Amino acid sequence: MSTGSGLDSRPIIRPDRDLRFAHEEHPLEALMSRFDYAAERLHLDPGLYKVLRNPEHQVIVSVPVLLDSGETEVYTGYRVIYNSSRGPGKGGIRFRPDVTLDEVTALAAWMTWKCAVVNIPFGGAKGGVVCDPSTMSVGELERLTRRYTSGIIDKLGPDSDVPAPDVNTNERIMAWIMDTYSMHKRHTVNAVVTGKPITMGGSLGRREATGRGCMIVTRAALSRLGIPLQGARAVVQGFGNVGSIAAQMMHEQGMSIHAVSDHTGGIINEKGLDVTGVMAWLKEHRVLEGYPNADSISNEDLMELECDVLVPAALEHVITMKNAERIKARVICEGANGPTSARADKILDAKGVFVIPDILANAGGVTVSYFEWVQDRGGYFWDEDTVNERLEKIMERSFHEVCTMAEQHGVSLRIASYMLAIERVAAVHRLRGMYA
Ligand code: NAD
Protein backbone atom coordinates (compact mmCIF):
# COMPACT_ATOMS: atom_id res chain seq x y z
CA MET A 1 0.00 0.00 0.00
CA SER A 2 1.46 3.34 -0.94
CA THR A 3 0.83 6.64 0.78
CA GLY A 4 1.47 10.26 -0.01
CA SER A 5 4.54 10.02 2.14
CA GLY A 6 5.97 7.55 -0.39
CA LEU A 7 6.27 4.82 2.23
CA ASP A 8 5.24 1.24 2.00
CA SER A 9 3.15 0.19 4.94
CA ARG A 10 2.79 -3.32 6.22
CA PRO A 11 -0.69 -4.72 5.64
CA ILE A 12 -1.71 -6.05 9.02
CA ILE A 13 -4.68 -8.13 7.98
CA ARG A 14 -5.00 -10.91 5.46
CA PRO A 15 -7.32 -9.65 2.74
CA ASP A 16 -8.62 -13.07 1.69
CA ARG A 17 -9.46 -14.29 5.17
CA ASP A 18 -13.20 -13.70 5.21
CA LEU A 19 -15.28 -14.67 2.19
CA ARG A 20 -18.21 -12.51 3.31
CA PHE A 21 -16.20 -9.54 2.15
CA ALA A 22 -14.87 -11.06 -1.05
CA HIS A 23 -16.30 -8.33 -3.29
CA GLU A 24 -15.22 -5.30 -1.32
CA GLU A 25 -12.49 -4.31 1.06
CA HIS A 26 -12.62 -6.19 4.35
CA PRO A 27 -13.88 -3.78 7.08
CA LEU A 28 -10.49 -3.92 8.77
CA GLU A 29 -8.71 -3.12 5.50
CA ALA A 30 -11.16 -0.26 5.02
CA LEU A 31 -10.13 1.02 8.44
CA MET A 32 -6.48 1.06 7.43
CA SER A 33 -7.12 2.69 4.06
CA ARG A 34 -9.18 5.42 5.77
CA PHE A 35 -6.29 5.89 8.20
CA ASP A 36 -3.85 6.18 5.30
CA TYR A 37 -6.01 8.71 3.49
CA ALA A 38 -6.50 10.83 6.61
CA ALA A 39 -2.74 10.70 7.36
CA GLU A 40 -2.06 11.86 3.82
CA ARG A 41 -4.49 14.77 4.17
CA LEU A 42 -2.71 15.76 7.38
CA HIS A 43 0.70 15.59 5.64
CA LEU A 44 1.79 13.40 8.52
CA ASP A 45 5.55 13.17 8.93
CA PRO A 46 6.75 9.87 7.33
CA GLY A 47 8.48 8.73 10.52
CA LEU A 48 5.42 9.35 12.62
CA TYR A 49 3.30 7.62 9.99
CA LYS A 50 5.44 4.50 10.44
CA VAL A 51 5.08 4.69 14.21
CA LEU A 52 1.30 5.05 14.07
CA ARG A 53 0.95 2.31 11.45
CA ASN A 54 2.51 -0.31 13.74
CA PRO A 55 1.32 -1.84 17.01
CA GLU A 56 3.39 -1.21 20.15
CA HIS A 57 2.98 -4.66 21.69
CA GLN A 58 1.56 -7.94 20.44
CA VAL A 59 1.38 -10.73 22.99
CA ILE A 60 0.60 -14.33 22.06
CA VAL A 61 0.03 -16.80 24.87
CA SER A 62 -0.74 -20.49 25.09
CA VAL A 63 -3.64 -21.07 27.42
CA PRO A 64 -3.76 -24.63 28.77
CA VAL A 65 -7.12 -25.53 30.31
CA LEU A 66 -8.16 -28.64 32.20
CA LEU A 67 -11.51 -29.60 30.66
CA ASP A 68 -14.39 -31.15 32.63
CA SER A 69 -13.64 -34.45 30.87
CA GLY A 70 -10.22 -34.60 32.52
CA GLU A 71 -8.44 -33.88 29.23
CA THR A 72 -6.21 -30.84 28.68
CA GLU A 73 -6.78 -28.45 25.80
CA VAL A 74 -4.43 -25.65 24.81
CA TYR A 75 -5.97 -22.46 23.42
CA THR A 76 -4.24 -19.45 21.88
CA GLY A 77 -4.75 -15.99 23.33
CA TYR A 78 -3.76 -12.57 22.04
CA ARG A 79 -3.50 -9.12 23.52
CA VAL A 80 -2.39 -6.19 21.42
CA ILE A 81 -1.65 -2.71 22.72
CA TYR A 82 -1.66 -0.67 19.57
CA ASN A 83 -0.76 2.72 20.98
CA SER A 84 -0.45 3.97 24.55
CA SER A 85 0.96 7.45 24.02
CA ARG A 86 -2.19 9.16 25.36
CA GLY A 87 -2.83 6.72 28.21
CA PRO A 88 -3.42 3.04 29.02
CA GLY A 89 -4.53 0.68 26.28
CA LYS A 90 -8.32 0.29 26.16
CA GLY A 91 -10.30 -2.32 24.33
CA GLY A 92 -12.38 -5.45 24.61
CA ILE A 93 -11.51 -9.14 24.70
CA ARG A 94 -13.36 -11.47 22.33
CA PHE A 95 -13.71 -15.25 22.58
CA ARG A 96 -14.24 -16.64 19.08
CA PRO A 97 -13.07 -19.71 17.16
CA ASP A 98 -11.85 -17.65 14.19
CA VAL A 99 -10.16 -14.75 15.96
CA THR A 100 -6.70 -13.93 14.56
CA LEU A 101 -3.78 -11.76 15.59
CA ASP A 102 -4.33 -9.60 12.49
CA GLU A 103 -7.95 -8.98 13.42
CA VAL A 104 -7.09 -8.15 17.03
CA THR A 105 -4.35 -5.78 15.87
CA ALA A 106 -6.61 -3.91 13.49
CA LEU A 107 -9.32 -3.66 16.15
CA ALA A 108 -6.73 -2.31 18.61
CA ALA A 109 -5.87 0.38 16.06
CA TRP A 110 -9.59 1.14 15.73
CA MET A 111 -9.82 1.63 19.51
CA THR A 112 -6.84 4.01 19.40
CA TRP A 113 -8.66 6.33 16.98
CA LYS A 114 -12.01 5.95 18.74
CA CYS A 115 -10.59 7.01 22.11
CA ALA A 116 -8.74 9.90 20.51
CA VAL A 117 -11.76 11.21 18.60
CA VAL A 118 -13.68 11.71 21.85
CA ASN A 119 -10.46 12.91 23.51
CA ILE A 120 -10.41 10.51 26.45
CA PRO A 121 -6.96 9.75 27.88
CA PHE A 122 -6.68 6.18 26.63
CA GLY A 123 -4.72 4.46 23.91
CA GLY A 124 -6.08 1.50 21.96
CA ALA A 125 -5.89 -2.22 22.66
CA LYS A 126 -7.77 -5.43 21.93
CA GLY A 127 -7.60 -9.06 22.97
CA GLY A 128 -8.91 -12.41 21.86
CA VAL A 129 -8.84 -16.10 22.64
CA VAL A 130 -9.34 -18.68 19.90
CA CYS A 131 -12.13 -20.77 21.42
CA ASP A 132 -15.79 -21.59 21.03
CA PRO A 133 -17.46 -20.58 24.31
CA SER A 134 -20.78 -22.14 23.21
CA THR A 135 -19.20 -25.58 23.66
CA MET A 136 -17.61 -24.83 27.04
CA SER A 137 -18.97 -25.18 30.56
CA VAL A 138 -18.94 -22.25 32.98
CA GLY A 139 -16.07 -23.87 34.87
CA GLU A 140 -14.03 -24.33 31.69
CA LEU A 141 -14.66 -20.71 30.69
CA GLU A 142 -13.56 -19.49 34.10
CA ARG A 143 -10.34 -21.52 33.98
CA LEU A 144 -9.68 -20.30 30.43
CA THR A 145 -10.26 -16.67 31.44
CA ARG A 146 -8.06 -16.87 34.52
CA ARG A 147 -5.19 -18.61 32.72
CA TYR A 148 -5.37 -16.17 29.80
CA THR A 149 -5.34 -13.29 32.30
CA SER A 150 -2.28 -14.66 34.05
CA GLY A 151 -0.59 -15.08 30.64
CA ILE A 152 -1.01 -11.40 29.76
CA ILE A 153 -0.76 -10.07 33.31
CA ASP A 154 2.51 -8.20 32.74
CA LYS A 155 0.74 -5.99 30.22
CA LEU A 156 -2.46 -5.45 32.22
CA GLY A 157 -3.05 -2.75 34.80
CA PRO A 158 -5.03 0.44 35.41
CA ASP A 159 -2.00 2.43 34.21
CA SER A 160 -1.08 0.25 31.26
CA ASP A 161 -3.94 -1.75 29.73
CA VAL A 162 -7.62 -1.93 30.68
CA PRO A 163 -9.73 -4.63 28.98
CA ALA A 164 -13.53 -4.66 28.57
CA PRO A 165 -16.18 -7.06 27.24
CA ASP A 166 -16.48 -7.73 23.50
CA VAL A 167 -17.90 -10.58 21.39
CA ASN A 168 -18.83 -13.53 23.69
CA THR A 169 -17.42 -11.96 26.84
CA ASN A 170 -19.45 -10.22 29.52
CA GLU A 171 -19.40 -8.68 32.99
CA ARG A 172 -18.97 -12.06 34.64
CA ILE A 173 -15.79 -12.68 32.65
CA MET A 174 -14.59 -9.16 33.55
CA ALA A 175 -15.14 -10.06 37.23
CA TRP A 176 -12.88 -13.15 36.82
CA ILE A 177 -10.18 -11.05 35.12
CA MET A 178 -10.37 -8.46 37.88
CA ASP A 179 -10.18 -11.14 40.56
CA THR A 180 -7.23 -12.94 38.95
CA TYR A 181 -5.31 -9.70 38.56
CA SER A 182 -6.13 -8.67 42.14
CA MET A 183 -4.98 -12.04 43.53
CA HIS A 184 -1.59 -11.56 41.84
CA LYS A 185 -1.31 -8.00 43.18
CA ARG A 186 -2.44 -9.06 46.68
CA HIS A 187 -5.08 -6.33 46.82
CA THR A 188 -8.31 -5.44 45.02
CA VAL A 189 -7.74 -3.49 41.79
CA ASN A 190 -11.12 -2.85 40.24
CA ALA A 191 -9.83 -0.28 37.70
CA VAL A 192 -8.02 -3.03 35.75
CA VAL A 193 -11.15 -3.78 33.68
CA THR A 194 -14.34 -1.93 32.74
CA GLY A 195 -17.76 -3.34 32.01
CA LYS A 196 -17.83 -4.91 35.48
CA PRO A 197 -20.95 -5.56 37.53
CA ILE A 198 -22.11 -2.34 39.27
CA THR A 199 -21.65 -3.95 42.69
CA MET A 200 -17.91 -4.35 42.13
CA GLY A 201 -17.11 -0.97 40.62
CA GLY A 202 -19.05 -0.84 37.35
CA SER A 203 -20.57 2.48 36.29
CA LEU A 204 -24.21 3.42 36.25
CA GLY A 205 -25.28 4.28 32.71
CA ARG A 206 -22.68 2.02 31.00
CA ARG A 207 -25.26 -0.40 29.58
CA GLU A 208 -27.16 2.43 27.86
CA ALA A 209 -24.11 4.54 26.97
CA THR A 210 -23.56 3.50 23.34
CA GLY A 211 -27.23 3.88 22.38
CA ARG A 212 -27.43 7.16 24.30
CA GLY A 213 -24.35 8.43 22.46
CA CYS A 214 -26.02 7.54 19.13
CA MET A 215 -29.07 9.58 20.13
CA ILE A 216 -26.93 12.57 21.17
CA VAL A 217 -24.95 12.77 17.92
CA THR A 218 -28.10 12.17 15.84
CA ARG A 219 -29.86 15.02 17.62
CA ALA A 220 -26.86 17.26 16.97
CA ALA A 221 -26.80 16.26 13.29
CA LEU A 222 -30.51 16.97 12.80
CA SER A 223 -30.11 20.36 14.42
CA ARG A 224 -27.13 21.14 12.18
CA LEU A 225 -29.08 20.14 9.07
CA GLY A 226 -32.18 22.08 10.15
CA ILE A 227 -34.34 18.94 10.34
CA PRO A 228 -36.86 19.23 13.21
CA LEU A 229 -36.25 16.61 15.88
CA GLN A 230 -39.95 16.27 16.66
CA GLY A 231 -41.42 13.72 14.31
CA ALA A 232 -38.11 12.98 12.50
CA ARG A 233 -38.41 9.44 11.14
CA ALA A 234 -35.82 6.87 12.21
CA VAL A 235 -35.14 3.32 11.05
CA VAL A 236 -32.96 1.06 13.20
CA GLN A 237 -31.29 -2.16 12.05
CA GLY A 238 -30.36 -4.40 15.00
CA PHE A 239 -32.37 -4.33 18.20
CA GLY A 240 -29.77 -5.43 20.72
CA ASN A 241 -27.93 -3.33 23.28
CA VAL A 242 -27.07 -0.46 20.92
CA GLY A 243 -30.08 -0.46 18.57
CA SER A 244 -32.85 -0.90 21.13
CA ILE A 245 -31.49 1.79 23.48
CA ALA A 246 -30.86 4.18 20.57
CA ALA A 247 -34.45 3.64 19.35
CA GLN A 248 -35.87 4.10 22.82
CA MET A 249 -33.92 7.30 23.44
CA MET A 250 -34.66 8.79 20.01
CA HIS A 251 -38.34 8.04 20.66
CA GLU A 252 -38.11 9.83 24.03
CA GLN A 253 -36.71 12.86 22.17
CA GLY A 254 -39.86 12.99 20.03
CA MET A 255 -38.60 11.11 16.99
CA SER A 256 -40.85 8.60 15.28
CA ILE A 257 -39.37 5.10 15.08
CA HIS A 258 -40.63 3.89 11.76
CA ALA A 259 -39.05 0.44 11.54
CA VAL A 260 -36.66 -1.77 13.48
CA SER A 261 -35.16 -5.21 12.91
CA ASP A 262 -33.17 -8.05 14.40
CA HIS A 263 -31.73 -11.28 12.96
CA THR A 264 -35.30 -12.64 12.53
CA GLY A 265 -36.32 -9.73 10.26
CA GLY A 266 -37.91 -6.32 10.56
CA ILE A 267 -41.16 -4.72 11.68
CA ILE A 268 -42.60 -1.49 10.29
CA ASN A 269 -45.47 0.81 11.21
CA GLU A 270 -46.14 3.82 8.96
CA LYS A 271 -47.49 5.79 11.92
CA GLY A 272 -44.47 5.01 14.09
CA LEU A 273 -43.83 1.99 16.29
CA ASP A 274 -44.85 1.87 19.94
CA VAL A 275 -41.25 1.46 21.12
CA THR A 276 -42.22 0.63 24.71
CA GLY A 277 -44.51 -2.10 23.40
CA VAL A 278 -41.74 -3.48 21.15
CA MET A 279 -39.31 -3.52 24.09
CA ALA A 280 -41.86 -5.37 26.23
CA TRP A 281 -42.44 -7.91 23.41
CA LEU A 282 -38.70 -8.48 23.08
CA LYS A 283 -38.29 -9.00 26.80
CA GLU A 284 -40.88 -11.75 26.72
CA HIS A 285 -40.15 -13.38 23.34
CA ARG A 286 -36.40 -12.60 22.87
CA VAL A 287 -36.97 -11.86 19.13
CA LEU A 288 -38.97 -9.28 17.17
CA GLU A 289 -40.60 -11.95 15.01
CA GLY A 290 -44.35 -12.17 15.67
CA TYR A 291 -44.75 -8.65 17.10
CA PRO A 292 -48.46 -7.97 16.47
CA ASN A 293 -48.85 -4.19 15.93
CA ALA A 294 -46.72 -3.83 12.81
CA ASP A 295 -46.12 -5.21 9.31
CA SER A 296 -43.10 -7.31 8.43
CA ILE A 297 -40.19 -6.12 6.33
CA SER A 298 -36.92 -7.78 5.35
CA ASN A 299 -33.62 -6.48 6.66
CA GLU A 300 -32.59 -5.63 3.10
CA ASP A 301 -35.72 -3.56 2.35
CA LEU A 302 -35.54 -1.87 5.74
CA MET A 303 -32.17 -0.36 4.84
CA GLU A 304 -33.70 1.33 1.80
CA LEU A 305 -36.69 2.95 3.50
CA GLU A 306 -37.32 6.66 3.12
CA CYS A 307 -36.40 8.20 6.48
CA ASP A 308 -34.53 11.05 8.15
CA VAL A 309 -32.18 8.81 10.14
CA LEU A 310 -30.93 5.29 9.52
CA VAL A 311 -29.12 3.58 12.40
CA PRO A 312 -27.24 0.41 11.36
CA ALA A 313 -26.65 -1.20 14.77
CA ALA A 314 -26.07 -4.87 14.00
CA LEU A 315 -23.35 -6.01 11.63
CA GLU A 316 -20.40 -4.95 9.53
CA HIS A 317 -20.83 -4.07 5.84
CA VAL A 318 -24.59 -3.77 5.58
CA ILE A 319 -24.20 -0.69 3.36
CA THR A 320 -22.12 -1.64 0.34
CA MET A 321 -21.87 -0.77 -3.34
CA LYS A 322 -24.84 -3.15 -3.82
CA ASN A 323 -27.37 -0.99 -1.96
CA ALA A 324 -25.73 2.40 -1.28
CA GLU A 325 -27.34 4.01 -4.31
CA ARG A 326 -30.80 3.07 -3.01
CA ILE A 327 -30.31 4.36 0.54
CA LYS A 328 -32.80 7.18 1.11
CA ALA A 329 -31.87 8.28 4.62
CA ARG A 330 -30.66 11.87 5.07
CA VAL A 331 -28.52 10.95 8.09
CA ILE A 332 -26.79 7.65 8.88
CA CYS A 333 -25.72 7.12 12.48
CA GLU A 334 -23.32 4.17 12.58
CA GLY A 335 -24.13 2.39 15.84
CA ALA A 336 -22.34 -0.77 14.67
CA ASN A 337 -18.63 -0.95 13.91
CA GLY A 338 -17.86 -0.87 10.19
CA PRO A 339 -21.41 -0.99 8.74
CA THR A 340 -20.40 0.93 5.60
CA SER A 341 -17.87 -0.27 3.04
CA ALA A 342 -15.27 2.12 1.64
CA ARG A 343 -16.89 1.98 -1.81
CA ALA A 344 -20.31 2.71 -0.34
CA ASP A 345 -18.78 5.72 1.44
CA LYS A 346 -18.04 7.30 -1.93
CA ILE A 347 -21.59 6.71 -3.18
CA LEU A 348 -23.15 8.13 0.00
CA ASP A 349 -20.84 11.14 -0.15
CA ALA A 350 -21.89 11.85 -3.72
CA LYS A 351 -25.56 11.60 -2.71
CA GLY A 352 -24.99 14.07 0.13
CA VAL A 353 -25.95 11.64 2.90
CA PHE A 354 -24.73 12.91 6.28
CA VAL A 355 -22.84 9.92 7.73
CA ILE A 356 -21.91 10.04 11.41
CA PRO A 357 -19.02 7.53 11.39
CA ASP A 358 -18.75 4.62 13.80
CA ILE A 359 -15.64 5.86 15.60
CA LEU A 360 -17.65 8.89 16.67
CA ALA A 361 -21.25 7.62 16.70
CA ASN A 362 -20.70 4.58 18.92
CA ALA A 363 -17.98 6.06 21.16
CA GLY A 364 -20.46 6.61 24.01
CA GLY A 365 -19.67 3.13 25.31
CA VAL A 366 -15.93 3.64 25.64
CA THR A 367 -16.53 7.11 27.07
CA VAL A 368 -18.54 5.69 29.97
CA SER A 369 -15.91 2.94 30.32
CA TYR A 370 -13.49 5.81 30.88
CA PHE A 371 -15.88 7.19 33.51
CA GLU A 372 -15.92 3.75 35.16
CA TRP A 373 -12.11 3.73 35.33
CA VAL A 374 -12.08 7.29 36.73
CA GLN A 375 -14.64 6.36 39.40
CA ASP A 376 -12.75 3.17 40.36
CA ARG A 377 -9.49 5.07 40.69
CA GLY A 378 -11.07 7.82 42.74
CA GLY A 379 -13.11 5.39 44.81
CA TYR A 380 -16.03 7.76 44.46
CA PHE A 381 -19.08 6.83 42.40
CA TRP A 382 -21.31 9.21 40.47
CA ASP A 383 -25.08 9.13 40.20
CA GLU A 384 -26.57 8.26 36.83
CA ASP A 385 -27.51 11.85 35.95
CA THR A 386 -23.89 12.91 36.39
CA VAL A 387 -22.69 10.09 34.11
CA ASN A 388 -25.27 11.02 31.46
CA GLU A 389 -24.58 14.75 31.62
CA ARG A 390 -20.83 14.21 31.23
CA LEU A 391 -21.40 11.78 28.37
CA GLU A 392 -23.61 14.31 26.62
CA LYS A 393 -20.97 17.01 26.94
CA ILE A 394 -18.24 14.81 25.44
CA MET A 395 -20.39 13.48 22.58
CA GLU A 396 -21.68 16.93 21.61
CA ARG A 397 -18.25 18.51 21.80
CA SER A 398 -16.70 15.70 19.74
CA PHE A 399 -19.44 15.93 17.13
CA HIS A 400 -18.83 19.66 16.67
CA GLU A 401 -15.04 19.21 16.59
CA VAL A 402 -15.40 16.62 13.83
CA CYS A 403 -17.76 18.87 11.86
CA THR A 404 -15.29 21.76 12.14
CA MET A 405 -12.44 19.53 10.93
CA ALA A 406 -14.61 18.34 8.01
CA GLU A 407 -15.40 21.91 7.00
CA GLN A 408 -11.80 23.10 7.31
CA HIS A 409 -10.46 20.33 5.10
CA GLY A 410 -13.43 19.72 2.81
CA VAL A 411 -13.65 16.04 3.77
CA SER A 412 -16.37 13.68 4.99
CA LEU A 413 -17.11 13.34 8.69
CA ARG A 414 -15.46 9.93 8.58
CA ILE A 415 -12.16 11.22 7.26
CA ALA A 416 -12.42 14.24 9.58
CA SER A 417 -12.81 11.88 12.56
CA TYR A 418 -9.66 10.01 11.60
CA MET A 419 -7.81 13.27 10.99
CA LEU A 420 -8.82 14.62 14.39
CA ALA A 421 -7.83 11.37 16.10
CA ILE A 422 -4.51 10.98 14.26
CA GLU A 423 -3.62 14.60 14.91
CA ARG A 424 -4.28 14.15 18.65
CA VAL A 425 -2.14 11.02 18.89
CA ALA A 426 0.57 12.52 16.66
CA ALA A 427 0.67 15.72 18.75
CA VAL A 428 1.46 13.70 21.89
CA HIS A 429 4.19 11.75 20.06
CA ARG A 430 5.77 15.00 18.90
CA LEU A 431 5.74 16.49 22.41
CA ARG A 432 7.02 13.34 24.09
CA GLY A 433 9.72 12.86 21.48
CA MET A 434 11.42 9.59 20.67
CA TYR A 435 13.02 7.64 23.50
CA ALA A 436 16.23 6.21 22.11
P1 NAD B 1 -26.18 -7.22 20.48
O1 NAD B 1 -25.72 -8.61 20.33
O2 NAD B 1 -26.74 -6.75 21.77
O3 NAD B 1 -27.27 -6.89 19.35
C1 NAD B 1 -27.09 -7.19 18.00
C2 NAD B 1 -28.43 -7.07 17.30
O4 NAD B 1 -28.24 -7.27 15.90
C3 NAD B 1 -29.47 -8.10 17.75
O5 NAD B 1 -30.74 -7.51 17.80
C4 NAD B 1 -29.41 -9.13 16.63
O6 NAD B 1 -30.63 -9.85 16.50
C5 NAD B 1 -29.19 -8.22 15.45
N1 NAD B 1 -28.71 -8.92 14.26
C6 NAD B 1 -27.84 -9.96 14.20
N2 NAD B 1 -27.72 -10.37 12.92
C7 NAD B 1 -28.51 -9.56 12.18
C8 NAD B 1 -28.84 -9.48 10.80
N3 NAD B 1 -28.30 -10.33 9.92
N4 NAD B 1 -29.69 -8.52 10.40
C9 NAD B 1 -30.25 -7.66 11.29
N5 NAD B 1 -30.01 -7.70 12.60
C10 NAD B 1 -29.15 -8.64 13.04
O7 NAD B 1 -24.92 -6.31 20.05
P2 NAD B 1 -24.65 -4.79 20.40
O8 NAD B 1 -23.84 -4.71 21.64
O9 NAD B 1 -25.91 -4.01 20.28
O10 NAD B 1 -23.65 -4.40 19.21
C11 NAD B 1 -24.13 -4.09 17.90
C12 NAD B 1 -23.01 -3.45 17.10
O11 NAD B 1 -22.57 -2.27 17.80
C13 NAD B 1 -21.76 -4.29 16.91
O12 NAD B 1 -21.18 -3.91 15.67
C14 NAD B 1 -20.84 -3.82 18.02
O13 NAD B 1 -19.48 -4.04 17.72
C15 NAD B 1 -21.16 -2.34 18.01
N6 NAD B 1 -20.83 -1.65 19.25
C16 NAD B 1 -21.38 -2.01 20.44
C17 NAD B 1 -21.06 -1.31 21.58
C18 NAD B 1 -21.69 -1.63 22.91
O14 NAD B 1 -21.44 -0.90 23.88
N7 NAD B 1 -22.53 -2.66 23.01
C19 NAD B 1 -20.11 -0.26 21.54
C20 NAD B 1 -19.56 0.09 20.30
C21 NAD B 1 -19.93 -0.62 19.17
Image (cartoon, rainbow, N blue to C red):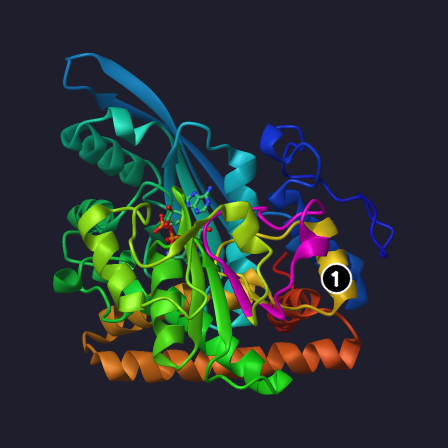
Q: Amino acid at mark 1?
A: Ala
Q: Is residue 44 left or right of residue 182?
A: right
Along the viewing direction, whichever of 9 and 187 lies nearer the viewer: 9
Residue with the mark numbered 1: 39
Circle 1 SS class: helix
* Residue ID at (32%, 20%): 74
The percent coordinates of residue 49 (x first, y second) are: 73, 57
Residue at horizontal 40 percent and vertical 43 percent from the top: 263
Horizontal side of 247 relative to 19 (left or right) equals left
Q: Is residue 276 above or below residue 340?
A: below
Q: Residue 240 versus residue 287: which sits nearer the camera?
A: 287
* Residue 40 seen in this snapshot: yes
Above or below, 297 against 269 in this view is above
> Quadrant of the rendered structure where residue 269 is?
bottom left
| The C terminus - image quarter | bottom right
Magenta: main secondary structure: loop
* Location of residue 381 (image quadrant): bottom left
Residue at horizontal 79 percent and vertical 57 percent from the top = 46
User: Is residue 338 rendered to the left or right of residue 10?
Assistant: left
Q: Find residue 180 and report its image quarter.
A: top left
Q: Where's the N terminus, which quadrant?
A: top right
Point out the stretch of residues depicted in magenta: 309-331
- Closer to us: 203 or 65: 203
The location of residue 221, given as percent across then percent down, is 57, 79
The reply to whether residue 18 is in sight is no
Q: Is residue 325 magenta?
A: yes
Q: Is residue 131 left or right of residue 51?
A: left
Q: Is residue 299 magenta?
A: no
